[in-house]
Amino acid sequence: MYTIEEVSEIIRADQEIIVDPGVVIKDLIYDSRKILQANNSLFFAFKGIRDGHLFIKDAYAKGIKNFVISNQHLNILLYPDANFLIVSDVLLAIQDLAAYHRKTFKHTVIGITGSNGKTVVKEWLGQLLSDKFNVYQSPKSYNSQLGVALSLWNLSNEYDLALIEAGISQEGEMDALEKMIRPEVGIFTSIGQAHASGFSSKERKIQEKMSLFAHSDKLIYPSENIPSHFVPYNAVSFSWGLNKSDTLQVLEIDHSKIDKTLLRFRYEENVYQLLIPFADRASVENCLTCVSTLLSFGYSFEQIQSKIITLKPVEMRLQLKQGKNNTSIIDDSYSNDLASLQIGLEFLNQQQQHAKKTLILSEMEGLKDSQKMQDKLLKLLHQQNLSMLIFVGDRQLINPESLSYSFLQYNDTKSLVADLPKLAFANESILIKGSRQFHLEDLSKHLVAKSHETKLEINLKALEHNLQVYRKLLPKDVKLMAMVKAFSYGSGGVEVANTLQFNHVDYLTVAFADEGVELRTAGIKTPIMVMSPDESTFETLLTYELEPEIYSFSILESFIDFLVAKGRKAFPIHIKVDTGMHRLGFLPEEVKSLLVLLKKSKEIRVKSVFSHLAAAGEDSERIFSKMQIESLTTFANTLEKALGYSLLKHIANTAAIVKWPEANLDMVRLGIGMYGIDTTHSNLGLEQVNTLKTTVTQLKELDESETVGYDRRGKLFRPSRIATVKIGYADGYDRRFGNGVGKMKIAGQEVSTIGNICMDMTMLDVTDIQVSEGDEVLVYPDISKAASSIGTIPYELLVTISSRVKRIYYYE
């Protein structure tokens, strides 16, 4: 790669402090939690929601000795053996480095952009072109200003074709991506509503995205979406669509075959037929883009047919599933390359619920033919703290003697599956990473627990996004307590807590001690407050270092007596004050009596004083909320002055973070908003975290004289088609949703319930839409509307989702 001195010159550093000019930079780091090989890493201190300069100390402690910073006032004397490059814009610096590195690549780069389908087209083309080319592709959805730079850094001349995805959300962003990627071939997938608010018009959006191809030699695009006058004059145009002028003219789209589509084309005055293995419009369009690309690269229709029929839906999400025998299965079995493997390994290392970590890895494309790729793979594997590596493929590609952990090898997935009883996976986290031809998804099916076809998908990336949205609203010195009570609002305790701990929240809060024990035994080390302790849990609190909320004299006195008997001193507690909620807590007038007890008790130390706003989201109750804030502040200041040490003060819940900035105090408690529910209707840009899905079990054609469900409550008034889906009130789907109140969505179409909700099943009237047995069903198209329709709140719908519903965690 490059020495630190060369990097300084490439990024045009304003100032440099170099004590070791010969160090070679191999890895680019922007997150101190994701350091693998510190000696040859360069840390970029980005100023985002959280200032990267604050984590230089942590990165240095982990061995990083090379930094790119923009803070000229940083005390670099604290890091005497480190190299520092000082620039005005750290993001621009990493982009300049990526652009320089891109220029050293001597082969073809294909740039891919559009509103939808970018990642799918990239993944499919990687598969389709691999017979002729050693293909590099940017990992997953690394298409942002930073993601593109990181993608290009991994580019090397052992590849002879690169697929680089580019995504933008507002005007002015594509220029930086174009300067880095400089694609010889451009692919424009589609234009749609995604990120529409960031552009003044649809035409401006097209123009901005099209600027990626300002210097491209060839452009592939759908004519329906992209008018020809937007195509750069210097590029050879390859359009597909319904027009006679299109390079590939679509003559007919036949949907008569189940799950397949028959296409008829005109290309170079000849007519061809092509069968593709998808029926939905998005997949058909993405296939047409891929077909056009293959034709432009000289493939015949016969070759294309044999390749295109093998395509499968792209699973773009790294999924974390509950496995059998207390295992956690990280399923990334649909793609395998060095960059995505590193992402998967980072996610595996993030999991704390099991000390034992196993990697099941298949051979990847091009590995046999590239010694350099083999060396990179071995280097990456050497850096891992694994318990076992199970390799599927040619044993000669991995030297087990060079590894510090156990190694097993299987020629194919079938042999590995047959050996599962002997392997007896238990009490471990398992990452499954495989190329498509090895079909490791078959292995995943054997390892994952529960066959119930109703599932709750939890998007951990969306959880991180929402966390950062609220952090952005807070001053930098305000701490954040995350609520993970009630099974993390139905989302699952351990997996959510792992993500929050990884993102450095200051406190976690549970309702009962048992919830805290589960988190501690799963490796969670973040401070945990327990909101409802009782005498029977005191031993548990001490054993697992759980900090109790103290809300009455009786519980305080009992806890002090217990600590005296145990000989413990200065155990942390949190004092709850009742400022008007009138649920739990000391009343403000009890402060003097409370102080008498606190001052004479060396067994405890107050960590925080807090209260709960009764109506933070109600504008009509602003006077009452202000009174609550003032009451807590007065109470806390009295305690603080008398005790002689500082206390954390907190009263702000999710709604107050938005509507009451004066209630931030020392810490805030983030709850429902973190899970994507904006109760303040403030257009915060929150992302949905939880998606409840089920499947169609059976379809029935019924006469208008029939009825549906218990008590014959489902009345039919016309010949009807009824779908039975696998969710009922035992899964948490409330009985009040019966008889048309509840709405679900199938293939984008909303349908109503019919009849009473059963324990395990619900019936839907699907007369007016196309439905097949096995189709996926979205249970809550809009969870806020669903809650309102039965007179409740989204909280209730989330926390009542049954534990028998399989939780699937994924990281986009």
Image: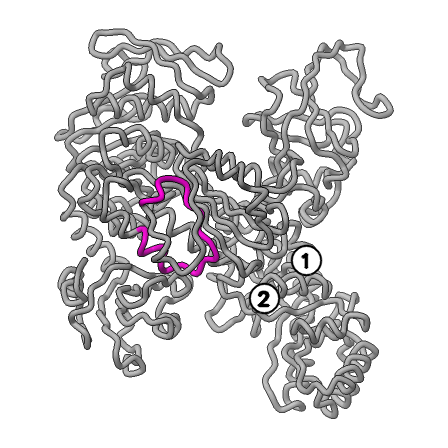
The magenta region covers 377-396
User: Can you tell which of label 2 and label 1 is closer to the viewer?
Assistant: 2
Q: Residues within 10 Å of mark 2 (few under 14, many from 20)?
A: many
Quadrant housing residue 755: top right
Residue in view at x 67 percent, y 59 percent: 485
The residue that label 1 is drawn on is 620
Pick whichever, 623 or 367, lies toward us.
Answer: 367
Q: Residues within 10 Å of mark 1 (few under 14, many from 20)?
A: few
The kind of secondary structure element at disc 1 is helix
Q: Quadrant of the N terminus?
A: bottom left
Q: Is residue 468 visible?
A: no
Residue 67 at x, y = what percent? 27, 69
The kind of secondary structure element at disc 2 is strand
Confirm or deny contact between disc 2 and disc 1 (CB under 8 A). Answer: no
Left or right side of 574 for 199: left
> In this rendering, is residue 352 above or below 327?
below
Magenta highlight on residue 386: yes
Amino acid type, residue under disc 1 in the picture: Ser
Pick whichever, 620 or 667, lies toward us.
Answer: 667
Magenta highlight on residue 717: no
Q: In which quarter of the image is the C terminus?
A: top left
Residue in view at x 69 percent, y 74 percent: 543
Residue 391 at x, y = what percent? 41, 45
> In this rendering, is residue 119 above or below 767?
below
Quadrant housing residue 201: top left
The residue that label 2 is drawn on is 481
Disc 2 from disc 1: Cα separation: 27 Å
Amino acid type, residue under disc 2 in the picture: Met
Pick whichever, 682 or 517, lies toward us.
Answer: 517
Left or right side of 7 for 388: right
> In this rendering, is residue 573 above or below 384?
below
